[in-house]
Every structure is written in C-alpha cells, then in structure tokens.
C-alpha cells in the first residue's frame, strides 16, 4: 500500500506540511517495501485555482491509496473520494512521526472536509 | 468613443465621474456599469427599466452512458474544473470558466454544455441616457463573463460609451477596459491614492490604451500625485475640489452637475481635453 504524506522535504525527517493542495510536495511511502519516493507539487502550488484537485491527480499518478496530511478542503475531499483515496489527518511534526502514528493505527480517516477551501 | 473610467483604489469617485459625464453628454450616451459585484450608477441615474436578462455560462454535463473515462477532458482543463479518476469525470462548476474546451476534446461526444446562472443584465432609460448594469449573483466568483455580457449590449452607433469599471487591476478590470479607446484613471491626492494610481498606470500601459488622470478631492493630502504625473508625462484632465457640497449631493444620490450647475463646465472641459488628446494633442502617455 502506498501512503502520501504532505511535506516540504525529501526524507522521513522532513517536517509535515499541514496543507494538501498547496503543499510543497509529497513523500509517497510504500508500506510493502518500506521505500519512499519524493514527489514535487510545485505545479499545484502555482496554479490559480483547483490546487487540491491537481494535487489529487499527482498522488493518484504515483499510485497512492492513502493520504496523511494536516487538513483537507471540500474540493480536494471530493476529488480524493472519487479517486478512492482514504484521508487521514494528523498534527505530527515530521513525516516519520506521522508514519509511525499511521502504522500504529492511531490516525482516524476523515469522512468530510475539515476546513473551508483556501483555508491557509 | 469608448471611454473607460477606472482606478486602482476603490472609492476615488469613478461612479461620480461616470454618471456626471453621462449627464453632461446627455441624450444618446450609453453608460455601462461594469462593477457587477456592486453596481451603483443606477442610484444616481434613476430611470425606467427596459430590460432584464439572466446571464449564464456554459458548464459541462457528462452523459455517463457515453463516457469511457479516458480523462481527456481533465487533461485539457487548466482550471481543474473537470477531472476523471478512471470513472466518469467529476465537475466543479464554481471553478469552470465556461470555455467549452472539455466538450470539444471529448472523443466520445459525452459532454454537452448546460447553463449555470451567474447574474443578470438590466437596461434602463434615463432622460436619453441608456444605462446598462450587471448584477453578479451572490456566491459567484467569476465576474468577467457577466462584464462581457454587459459590454455585449453596447450599441455601436457612433455615440459615446462610458464604462464604469470596478476598482483594482485584476481580471474584472481588464475585462472592462479591453477594447476601450481611452481610460480615465480617477485618484485622490493622498499616499494611498498615489500608490494605487501607480498600479493602475502600469496596467493601462500594459494594455497600451491612451489614458489621463482625474484628481478628485483636491485640497486634501499632498502634491505627490501631481509630481508623479508630471514626471511620467501623464496629463491631468480634471481636478475636482474637496467641496463639501459635492459630498452632500452625493449623499442624497444627486448628480453634481444637477445639484451644482457650476460644475457642468468641469465635466465639459474634461470631455474636450479627452477629445484634444485623441485628435493628436500629443500629451497622451
């Protein structure tokens, strides 16, 4: 299973980015092989509108099944749900902490958007 | 002549200049209130409504029985208003700019366009002045399609058309100014007025439309707007004093030229100045 974490960094020690659509990038972690791949999200950061939708396309392209992030707005939620991606929110500081919480089953998946669009 | 009245800063007097110019020109003039988020020219020119039409933009409607989820529509849409994840596409109507591209690129002909209402265009007749105004619906984020609808009511019959623009320098203003022959930038002689005037000057230079400045509320602030215009070679075409009686007329919804006839010549001179520049007076920037 592949899990996308929102982050500005390139490795597990990198800080989590609480945003999804306009996160600097993602770490796509493969729980089967314990490997990860950084994915750039600059295209969505710079888009005029629909960043959450474009970010969803990006993580779908990299095979993600789950997303771990800080918050999720309504359009991103609709797109992620349509793409069959489960969404988990966390306050964890780093990707490693978020991954540990995810593995421990300590994160609850959200059933609706938890913020308005353009919240940050 | 199509004359646009714009500003960087809000509240400088665009509508005051627009409605008083319209009254000064009189019969046959067309005044288009393009500030569709908060139209208010009709508060000063109260007339008989002659038209009221709903304006819609086309948004995609997907026939799921024809769609094979190829995703072409989503790859085409730069606004992310339609997207497919291996199933029939999702549509985000509030992100759609109504360009119709998704329907064109769909290889299966599965997308047709349905109307999404964005507002209304009203027409009024006021003592020979035709006033057209747009009213954007609450919750609609995109003003330009409604502004274009307002401008499409423009009659090309050789008379003067005044476009009352929204404040600022972004898309709704560009949609208003595009195609105009001359832009009046209304400002006030304050640091705030100067700052936003400079942005507006950059904008009209980018659009390569000849322009001049109207300084409203002369007597307040400082002389930096005048210095800026002098240094940049920008003509100041009208100065309106900070006259308490103008504010009083405004507060009652009256035209300055009606309440204070001595100001009629100010607006007549403004028109004359614009014509001079357009006839090659050589001072346009």
Image (cartoon, rainbow, N blue to C red):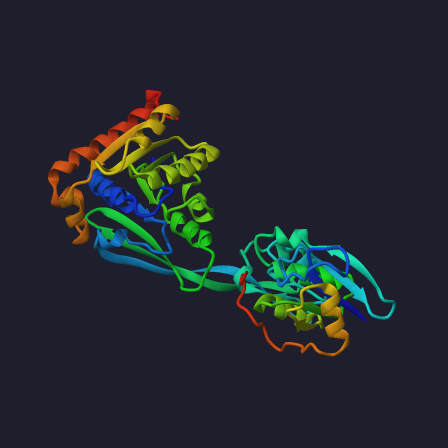
* Of residues B1 and B6, the one drawn nearer to the viewer in this rendering: B6
Residue B11, position as x, y percentages in the image: 30, 47
* Of residues B259 and B51, the one drawn nearer to the viewer in this rendering: B259
Instruction: Identify the residue at horizontal 46%, vertical 46% (top origin).
Output: B170
Is B139 situated above or below A39?
below
Is B157 situated above or below B75?
above
Specify the quadrant of the image occupied by residue A3: bottom right
Residue B58, position as x, y percentages in the image: 52, 60
Marker count (numbered): 0
Instruction: Identify the residue at horizontal 48%, vertical 34% (top origin).
Output: B206
Quarter placement of the C terminus of chain A: bottom right
* Of residues B193 and B119, the one drawn nearer to the viewer in this rendering: B193
Quarter placement of the N terminus of chain A: bottom right
- Say whether residue B283 is visible: yes
Specify the quadrant of the image occupied by residue A49: bottom right
Residue B1, position as x, y percentages in the image: 34, 35
Residue A65, position as x, y percentages in the image: 76, 70
- Say whether residue B28 is visible: no
Instruction: Identify the residue at horizontal 26%, vertical 58% (top origin).
Output: B49
* Of residues B251 and B222, the one drawn nearer to the viewer in this rendering: B222
- Of all residues shown, which one is farthest toward the right? A33
Is B177 situated above or below B280?
below
A81 left or right, relative to B207? right
Specify the quadrant of the image occupied by residue A117: bottom right
């Amino acid at each position: 299973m592949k899990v996308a974490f929102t982050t500005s960094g390139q490795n597990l020690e990198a800080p989590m980015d609480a945003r999804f659509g306009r996160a600097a990038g993602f770490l796509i972690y493969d729980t089967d092989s314990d490997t990860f791949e950084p994915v750039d999200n600059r295209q969505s950061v710079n888009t005029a509108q629909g960043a959450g939708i474009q970010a969803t396309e990006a993580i779908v392209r990299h095979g993600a099944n789950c997303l771990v992030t800080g918050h999720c707005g309504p359009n991103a939620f609709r797109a992620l749900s349509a793409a069959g991606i489960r969404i988990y929110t966390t306050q964890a500081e780093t990707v490693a902490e978020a991954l540990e919480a995810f593995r421990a089953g300590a994160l609850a998946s959200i059933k609706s958007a938890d913020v308005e669009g353009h919240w940050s | 002549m199509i004359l646009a009245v714009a500003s960087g800063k809000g509240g400088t007097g665009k509508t005051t200049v627009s409605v008083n110019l319209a009254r000064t020109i009189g019969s046959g003039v067309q005044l288009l209130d393009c500030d569709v988020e908060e139209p208010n020219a009709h508060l000063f020119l109260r007339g008989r409504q002659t038209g009221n039409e709903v304006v819609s933009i086309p948004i995609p409607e997907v026939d799921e029985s024809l769609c094979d989820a190829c995703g072409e529509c989503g790859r085409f849409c730069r606004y992310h208003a339609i997207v497919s994840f291996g199933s029939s596409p999702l549509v985000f109507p509030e992100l759609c700019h109504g360009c119709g591209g998704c329907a064109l690129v769909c290889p299966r002909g599965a997308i047709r366009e349905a109307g999404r209402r964005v507002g209304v265009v009203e027409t009024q007749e006021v003592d020979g002045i035709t006033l057209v105004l747009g009213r954007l619906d609450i919750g609609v984020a995109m003003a330009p399609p409604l502004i274009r609808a307002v401008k499409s009511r423009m009659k090309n019959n050789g008379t003067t058309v005044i476009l009352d623009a929204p404040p600022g320098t972004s898309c709704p203003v560009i949609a208003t100014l595009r195609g105009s022959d001359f832009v009046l930038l209304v400002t006030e002689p304050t640091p705030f007025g100067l700052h936003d005037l400079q942005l507006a000057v950059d904008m009209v230079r980018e659009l390569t439309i000849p322009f001049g400045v109207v300084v409203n509320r002369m007597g307040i602030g400082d002389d930096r707007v005048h210095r800026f215009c002098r240094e940049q070679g920008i003509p100041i075409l009208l100065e309106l004093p900070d006259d308490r009686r103008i504010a009083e007329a405004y507060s009652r919804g009256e035209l300055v030229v009606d309440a204070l006839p001595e100001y009629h010549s100010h607006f007549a001179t403004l028109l004359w100045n614009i014509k001079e520049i357009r006839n090659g007076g050589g001072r346009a920037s």
